[in-house]
Every structure is written in structure tokens, then in C-alpha cells.
Amino acid sequence: MATNEYEGVLKKIEELTTNAGQIQDEVLGEILSRNAGTEYLRGFLHGQTEKQLFKKNVPIVTYEDLKPYIDRIANGETSDILLAEPITAFFLSSGTSGGQPKMTPVTAQVTKNCELFRRLYESPVIKHFGDINQAGKRMELMFARPEIETPSGLKAASVSTSIYNESNFRTILPKLYTSPIETIFCPDPNQGLYCQLLFGLIQRDEVVTVGSLFASTVLRGVKFLENHWQELCYDIKTGRLSDWITDLGCRNAASLVMKPNPEQADLIENICNCKSWEGIIRKLWPKARYIGCVCTGVMRQYTAELEFYCRGLPLVSAFYACSEAICGINLEPLCKPCDVSYTFLPNMAYFEFIPVENEHDESIEMKRNDEDTELVDLVNVKAGQCYELVVTTCAGLYRYKVGDVLMVSGFYNNAPQFQFVERKNVILSVDQEKTSETDLSKAVTEAKALLDPLGFILTEYTSYVDTSSAPGHYVLFWEIKGKEGKHCKGLDPKIMVECCSKMEESLHYTYKIYRKRNIIAAVEIRVVKQGSFEALMDYYVSKGTSLSQYKKPSCIKSEEALKILDSRVIGKYFSPKLPL
Ligand code: AMP
């Protein structure tokens, strides 16, 4: 983006946020006037297009409600049963946060919105870090998944894969990124990752940003590097690609650029061959200005470890979006991951919000049904209040619950800014109690603090409810790493037992009451071997999840995934006493 172009985009952001209310009404008006005649909306609006009627008659739905329509289109019926604009493809959601991947329609308008969105979220970043597109290249870890063809002949792919397939992206790739297209589309993610790190290291003097879509993938890259840096250095020194890289695309791409470079290999070897890997990203890519990846939501658990590896380089979460809708951008790219807010873009969809009460607030006697709840418009949300996000899009989603809970942190002009709170559906529950992702994360944060002074770090965790014995109990899988080469075998079992107790003490009121009444049994922590969470990621990737869009589930629901972790358990610990 040229300087005057990004300044123009910043002006556009001013306009959009200033006129948020009016733009939202226009967006809804246009969606309704185009689509009122579809089979789906006709059933509720009888051809009418008034906003009030829409709010009164169109139901709030989940993916399951729209799935029959989407499946009909995928099976060959015309797309106008759901939307007037022709469907050109489908986006597949990652599916790791809520079960199966979901298919959402893509239209020409969606593609146009995606292009505009990229310019909108990049402009604040360019304002703060300079024009990275002119300054050098991005070392971005990217992984495409094979497309699926629906019976109707339409293609279905993850959003990221669709982007990597665009001709525009392929044109700019060699100039702006270190990874050749063949490494992004390599069918074996490990070969792709090895080659992307190799290309990133070969071009390290040109790299101005390091990143991936999500923080977990950047960390995966660093850990892979920890295991493979000697081999990578050998390849750079000799100018020959390791034999286990059998993918022809990767080999061809490498043959075009690799030549023996012993000086560069020695420099990298010296950097990697030190005891502590603190600040390793900064040392390996000294011109990098920031690390770009989503660090909010479930990714927050990775920020401490990433900060260790990047030592002082800012972590930039530039946007909040999902396969179903584009939502917001971060106007303060320099702020800490825990403070990141996303300013909603009123031109991307029509947004409504279901107020969310605190699940554990004893004063709330009964939770209201969505039908009884008045949905709040974008410009009418209240600061400090939490809401569940509902979107109506140009692509056939009408009053669709995304499943994310957000908190209003403020306003930019007239557009609200939201902090990501949690996925609505990720909870543990043995009986009537509901433990949200945030509840769990708070308890884990308290408990893991006991490990820090002893030189151990909790690097990954997930959970599930074990009801194989009565009463059921919460199980946490923890992967623990010793600082500076310490082995986690040296960890005192007493500390792990204390961690279990701390977790229980830190959980919410209802949980503790149920524990005392023996409705729930003691929390269990199962410590797993190093690399177990990588095996979990490999499993989901083998099942079709894109490595770029992978989000580790906070709660395991699949039997197979559970087996992967259970087969790697090296110690089991229980809380010995009731929580206070
Ligand atoms: P997908 O359906 O695979 O496109 O994933 C979209 C989901 O990823 C969203 O509904 C959120 O739960 C999560 N997500 C996306 N962007 C962010 C973000 N910036 N912060 C936190 N969570 C995010």
C-alpha cells in the first residue's frame, strides 16, 4: 500500500466509525431489499423489508438451523433459497472450537469485503510500524488445506486457503513474503513448516515482520525450530535440502534459491546454540518490527511464552473475524495483548448483540431465553457490558449466533470497541454448574503461578469432564517445561497436588458448593509428555483442520483426541482436600 493509499484508508475508518449507526441501517436495508424474496426470508417477512419486522419476525439462529438450506445448495439446488446473490464457493470454519467444520456461503460481495478488510486492518499497523510492504518481507507461517468439492461443484475451503488461492495473493507473494507458494500448499504440514522456516532464515536480513494467523502457530514454528535448527543450518551451509523433504513443489522452490552459505549458517548456529532461547525471534530476524498474530481469546494462553521468545518485540493482534463475518480491527496495534480491543466495522455486516449475564451471579434467578431478550444494535451497546454476537450478512446468514462473547471496552467515534471474552459454548459441566473458558483460564493462571518460582512453565493445557466414575470430575491436561533445560521429571509431586487444590480454590462459587456436597469429585491434573499438544494439533490437522486456522480446544470432546493425550500421561495428581 502506498503512503497516500493508507492515509486514505485511515480516513475511511474515520468515516465508517463516525457514521456507524446510519451505515448499519443501510447495510441491513440492502441485505433485506436484495434477499426478502428468498425462500428463507419469505417465510418470516412475506416479502417486506422493514427493520422492525425483521427484528420482530426473523428468528435468532445457530448453524444447525441454517444447515439444511446450506446443504441443499451444496447438493445442487439454486442458492436463491437463502440469498439472491449467486454463491461462488463456501468457507469452511476451523471446527476445532465447536465440533464439525461449518460451511458458509461466499459471494462476489464477500470477496470484495475481504479485500477491503485487509486494507482496513493493515492501515493502523502501517501507521505505527511504517510501510512494511516497502521495507522488506514478511516471514509468515501459512498452511493451505486441500479444497473440498461439493456435489453441486462448488469449492469449499478455509478462509486462509481461499486467500492463498487468489491470483492477487499469488502475485504479491514473492515480493512481500519469504514463503514460496509450494511450501504453503505442501500436503505435509511438517515439510511445509520446515521449508518455510528455511526460506525465512535464508532471507533473514530482509524480514520485517514474523507471524502467522494465530499465536499458537508461531509458537509451533519456534518449537519446531528448537528441534530442527542444526539440520536447517546444515542445509543452509551446504545449499542442499534435507532428504526427508520429498514434496516436489518444495524441492523445486528450494532449488531455485538455495546455494551454499556457510557464513549465514554459522551466524544462525551461534544464535541457536545458546542455553536460553529468550528473545530468539528478535536475534534470528533482527529487522523484525513486530510479531503479527491473533493473541486474544483462546490464544491468550500463548502470549507469555511468545513474549519470552520475542523479548520486547510487540505482539500485534490486528483483527477479529470469523468465517461467517468480518467484525473488527485493532486501532492500537501497540497495546498489550491483554488490553486489545477491536473496533467494529459497520459496513461489513449488520451486528446485533444479546446481553449476557454473569453465569455465577446469584441474584439472577432464571436465565432468559433468546426469544424474550431484546437484541441491542451496534451503536446502542453499553460500555462494560458483555454480549453474545449475532450477525446478519450479505451471504445468507440472518440473525446468526457466532458463538463469541465480547465485552464493550469503549467507543471510537460512534463505533463500539470490544474485547474478546470467550467462546460461548466452551464450558465444563458435571451437574448444573457451568464453567466457562474464562473461569477455567483464571483458575489455571492461579495454579500455574506455583510452578514459576521453581523454574517450570506451563506451556499448554486443555480439559475435559470425566464422568466414567461417579461423581464426575474435571480433568486438566498440562504440558510442563523446565526453564533452561531443566527436566519436568524433577518436579515435586507435592507441588502438583498443590496446583490441583489451587485450581479448585480459584474456581467459582457454584463449583465449590457442588464439590462440598460431593456432586463433583476432586480436580485431576494429568501431566503429559513434551510434544503431546503438537501430537494433538497433528491429529486435528490430519482430520482436515487447516494448520493456519487451528485453535486448540479448551475442552476436549473427541474420544480420539482424548486417547492421544491420555496415552502420553506421565503423572496424575488430585486435589486432596475440599476447597475453602
Ligand atoms: P473460524 O470459524 O475458523 O474462522 O474461527 C473464527 C473464530 O476464531 C471466531 O469466532 C473466534 O472465536 C476466534 N477468533 C477469531 N479472531 C479472533 C481474535 N482476534 N481474538 C479472539 N478470537 C478470535
Image (spheres, helix red, strand yellow):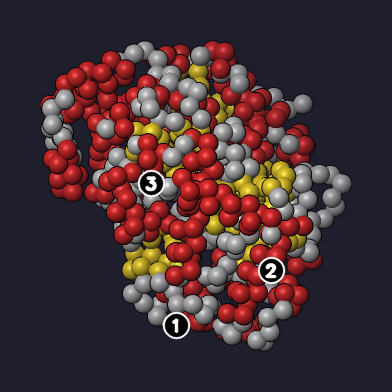
**Mark 2 lies on residue:** 25
Task: Find residue 78 and name its label.
Answer: 1
**Badges 1 and 3: C-beta atoms under 8 Å apart?**
no
Q: Position of residue 105 (x, y in %)?
A: 47, 69
Question: Furthest-front residue in view?
Answer: 4
Q: Residue at x 41, y 57 (%)?
A: 158
Label 1 within 8 A of ligand 1 by Cβ = no
Q: Residues within 10 Å of mark 2 (few under 14, many from 20)?
A: some
The one nearer the camera, 570 or 485, is 485
Q: Earlier in the sequence, mark 2 or mark 1?
A: 2
Q: Residue at x 44, y 82 (%)?
A: 77
Residue type indicated by callout 2 = Asp
State which mark lies toward you, 2 or 1: 2
Residue type indicated by callout 3 = Leu
Q: Residues within 10 Å of mark 3 (few under 14, many from 20)?
A: many
Query: Is 573 on the left-hand or right-hand side of 101?
Result: right
Residue type indicated by callout 1 = Thr
Distance, label 1 to label 3, CA atoms, is 32 Å
The one nearer the camera, 468 or 371, is 371
Q: Position of residue 343 (x, y in %)?
A: 63, 49
**Mark 3 lies on residue:** 547
**Badges 3 and 2: C-beta atoms under 8 Å apart?**
no
Q: Say what secondary structure mark 3 lies in.
A: loop
Task: Find residue 232 and name its label.
Answer: none
Q: Residue at x 60, y 18 (%)?
A: 450
Q: Is residue 329 above or below residue 135?
A: below
Distance, label 3 to label 2, CA atoms, is 37 Å
